[in-house]
Amino acid sequence: MKIFLILLLFSLSFSKTIIYDVYLYFFKVGNVKIELKDNETYAEGKTSEGMSWLYTYDFKFVQKGNEMFLYEREKNKERIFRREDVYRKKLWLPLIVEFIKEGRIKETNLFKVKDKGKFLEVFPTNSKRIQKIVIKRDLKSKNIPQEIIIYGKVKLSLKLKDVRED
């Protein structure tokens, strides 16, 4: 009986890891890894080592319940953002996490959402850098985007590389 209870406890814990390759136009420049664990989400991303001579950027994102934090390092500058600042400065990250967790994105005063069936278009209302975010749905796994395209000063694409369930 004890073994059954232990197995039941392990089976109730949920863990999923999603990895995206990041492209600047058609050049691979880095990767993003998102880990979902029960009521916690971790994400981290970094520039590829081969691109570090040109540009360096890395981040760590943590969401526990309603709290979220983002630590980023760009070149030699380090910044930490809390919940509201994450939505204002790095909108794409909490949007992707929300989409993966819930299969949809709730519109707020920070952005407008247009559902086009196979993809979602998100328009930030007060972002100087990002004009539009396109989230392309995957037919097999509706909650995990196949591709995320961020239109801003430059075009960034996050293309799904791997999904692991633990």
Image (cartoon, helix red, strand yellow):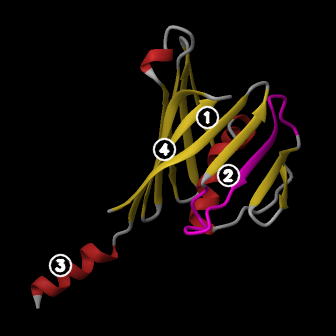
Query: Which disc number belongs to residue 81?
Result: 1
The residue under label 4 is which amino acid type?
Answer: Ala
Q: Is residue 98 left or right of residue 115?
A: left
Mark 4, Cα crowd under 10 Å, few <14 / some 14-19 / many 20+, is many
Mark 2, Cα crowd under 10 Å, few <14 / some 14-19 / many 20+, is some
Real-space Cα separation, disc 2 to disc 4, in angstroms: 13 Å
Extreme residue in the top direction: 53
Q: Earlier in the sequence, mark 1 or mark 4?
A: 4
User: Could you say which quadrant of the image residue 66 lies in?
Assistant: bottom right
Q: Earlier in the sequence, mark 2 or mark 4?
A: 4
User: Could you say which quadrant of the image residue 57 lies in?
Assistant: top right
* Quarter of the rendering occupied by the N terminus: bottom left
Q: Is residue 72 found inside the magenta-colored segment of the image?
A: no
Mark 1, Cα crowd under 10 Å, few <14 / some 14-19 / many 20+, is some
Magenta span of residues: 126-145
Query: Which disc number belongs to residue 137?
Result: none
Real-space Cα separation, disc 3 to disc 1, in angstroms: 39 Å
Measuring from the top left, give residue 123's x and y in whole percent: 85, 47
Q: Which residue is mark 4?
A: 43
